[in-house]
Image: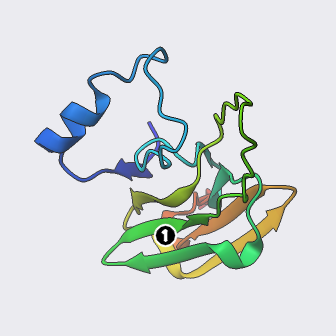
Amino acid sequence: MSALIRYDRPATLTDWFENLFDDGFFSWPSREIAAANWPRVDIVEEENAYRLHADLPGLAKDDIRISVENGVLTISGEKKAEKKEKKTGEYAYYERSYGSFSRAFRLPEHVDSEHINAAYVNGVLELTINKTEAAKPKQIEVKVQ
């Protein structure tokens, strides 16, 4: 089990009502990004670090913010809406979401939160979160007496 844990705020009654008709049939074209579901991420634990990949298509590097506070890593930002011109008499359907987003993850105690590396290539954000020396596996040499 990965030590990097998704950190969510408690659900509210408003959340329940917003999700009541969220079955794909009832959709709202101007609906903003669902905060708890976007961006989608993959987290991989390696020997010396954790790697987090987040899909952020269509965003500029300057639209993304990454912060660490009180052991919680937060990826946030805003996906700006494209200007949509609607002509009279034409039907238009918009499915792509836009708006502010935020995902938070509680960091394990054995990571170096002061030195997180971030790279953004082709719509994918990659964070490298290094483990501290104490958390890295160690080989103990057996001595002959």
- Viewed as shown, does residue 102 lie left or right of 21? right
Vertical placement of residue 88 versus 111, above or below: above
Q: Position of residue 141 (x, y in %)?
A: 63, 60
- What sort of colour scheme is used for the picture? rainbow
Q: Which residue is drawn at 60% across and 67% down?
A: 129
Vertical placement of residue 68 versus 43, above or below: below
Which image quadrant: the C terminus? Answer: bottom right
**Residue that label 1 marks:** 111
* Nearer to us in this view, 25 or 116: 25
- Viewed as shown, does residue 142 lie left or right of 13? right
Which image quadrant: the N terminus? Answer: top left
- Viewed as shown, does residue 25 lie left or right of 13? right
Residue that sits furthest to the right in the current view:
122
Q: Residue at x 48, y 49 (%)?
A: 32
Vertical placement of residue 123 versus 43, above or below: below
Mark 1 belongs to which amino acid? Val
Residue 141 can be seen in this image: no
